[in-house]
Image (cartoon, grey):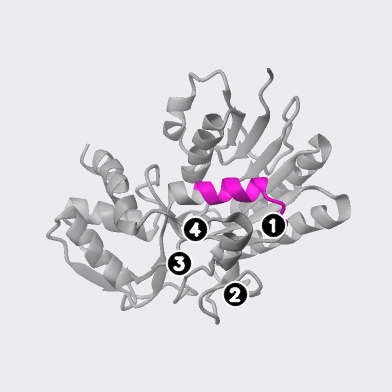
Amino acid sequence: MKKERVLITGGAGFLGSHLSDRFLKEGYHVIAMDNLITGSLDNIEHLMPSPDFEFYHHDVSKFVHVPGDLKYILHFASPASPIDYLKMPIQTLKVGSLGTHNLLGLALAKKARILVASTSEVYGDPLIHPQTEDYWGNVNPVGPRGVYDEAKRFQEAMTMAYHTYHGVETRIVRIFNTYGPRMRLEDGRVLPAFISQALRGEELSVFGEGSQTRSFCYVDDLVEGIYRLLLSDCADPVNVGNPEEITIREFAEEIIRLTDSKSTLSFHPLPKDDPKQRRPDISKAKEVLGWEPKYKRAEGLLPTLEYFKKKVLG
């Protein structure tokens, strides 16, 4: 029997590779597409021998062609960390706009359901806390983070337009801070930075006073939420993340204890437009998807730490 086929863009990235794992496990034929500007073939090397896995080296900002039927498209292609989108602002805007347009067109042509990866960054530096899906956000469109924030906001608008005008089956997930194995060491996000600094015995770089908050969701929980959303009937955006909140300073101290490091903290000026608070309201995910995170931070950090030990210490 012929297997249903799934296209995952950004398939060699942190989240895309974990999604590829999940869809193969669920019995689909997976096509991972990535231009490898932030993704890595190392993340999907273990999948290459599978007859149900294909890799296309392609930039989705250019015309996308995939022969044959497609059941689902998951659009996860985009630089996603500040260090990346500040370095590649034009590519970030293009993948969120042109790339999204190309993939929505492909979904229309193939009669495929498409799920797009949006982000908690659509809320900007939020004026309400925690953030609910009906909050419109507080975003600086011309600030340094605007290239990512506005690309994702446009992506949502374009996706909803294809849904209402063309009748394309669309799903929008707003992803909050996620962590786990296969994160890039040097991607500038707080968790890889803290763990790698602690393992090397360096000072942990805390921005501002460290009073800003984040909430961290383990990757397996996130993938489960995304999978449920894809199979649901909900076309409106849904927050998927872990509502357990922690200050950056507390998190730095937690990482030092976990790694048994002698590292201390160093404090640096807060980057422009850096969100002061970040915590999802997941009432909608609970109600519509029957989903909530299962992993406590302490549980998810253990396999994550093992992964980083191999990368940092060899």
Question: Where does label 2 land, which residue?
Answer: 140
Real-space Cα separation, disc 3 to disc 1, in angstroms: 24 Å
Q: Percent position (x, y) of residue 149?
A: 59, 64
Disc 1 marks a residue whose amino acid type is Gln
Q: Residue at x 66, y 73 (%)?
A: 134
Magenta extent: 223-235
Q: Quadrant of residue 290?
A: bottom right
Q: Residue at x 46, y 60 (%)?
A: 177
Helix, strand, or loop for circle 4? Answer: loop
In this view of the protein, which residue sits in the foreground, 296 or 8?
296
Tell me, yes or no, whether the two marked residues, 3 and 1, touch with CB atoms within 8 Å.
no
Disc 4 marks a residue whose amino acid type is Glu
Q: Residue at x 72, y 52 (%)?
A: 233
Q: Is residue 229 magenta?
A: yes
In this view of the protein, which residue sits in the foreground, 136 or 186?
136
Real-space Cα separation, disc 1 to disc 4, in angstroms: 25 Å
